Image (cartoon, grey):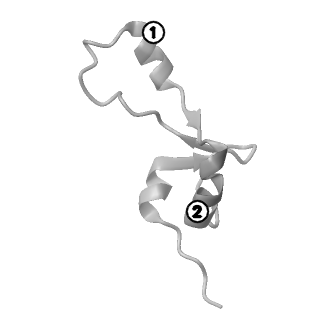
Amino acid sequence: MPKMKTHRGVAKRYKISGTGKIMHEPAGMSHLRSSKSSRRKRRLKVPDTVKTRYATKMDRLLPYGVK
């Protein structure tokens, strides 16, 4: 049986935390920052976890995890 391939697009956007959760950067910080409040920008800086309903799909796309 050949090795499973990691989806490279997903590997660049998601990381596995130390506890095994899949983390991602929230959308909305790349441009138009002057119109966003400081509170909104501060909260968008913090990485977020992937919802549980997407966990099985991510497990298929990231079979060996991402470091």
Q: Which mark is residue 27?
A: none
Where is residue 3? Give x, y as percent: 61, 82
18 left or right of 41? right
Where is residue 42? Give x, y as percent: 46, 15
Disc 2 and disc 1 in contact, CB within 8 angstroms = no
- What secondary structure is found at the residue carrying circle 2? loop
Crowdedness near tag 1: few (<14), some (14–19) or many (≥20) residues, C-alpha within 10 Å? few
- Say which amino acid is labelled 2: Leu
Q: Residue furthest top?
A: 38
- What secondary structure is found at the residue carrying circle 1? helix
Where is residue 11? Give x, y as percent: 49, 57
Crowdedness near tag 2: few (<14), some (14–19) or many (≥20) residues, C-alpha within 10 Å? many
21 left or right of 24? right
Q: Which mark is residue 62?
A: 2
15 relative to 40, above or below = below
Image point (64%, 52%), residue name: 55
- Say which amino acid is labelled 1: Arg
38 relative to 46, above or below = above
Nearest to N terminus: mark 2 or mark 1: 1
Image point (40%, 8%), residue name: 38
The residue that label 1 is drawn on is 39
Q: Residue furthest right?
A: 19
61 left or right of 36? right
Foreground pick, 44 / 17: 44
Quadrant in which the N terminus appears: bottom right
Where is residue 14? Give x, y as percent: 52, 48
Q: Quadrant of residue 2?
A: bottom right
- Between the C-alphas of marks 2 and 1, the distance is 33 Å
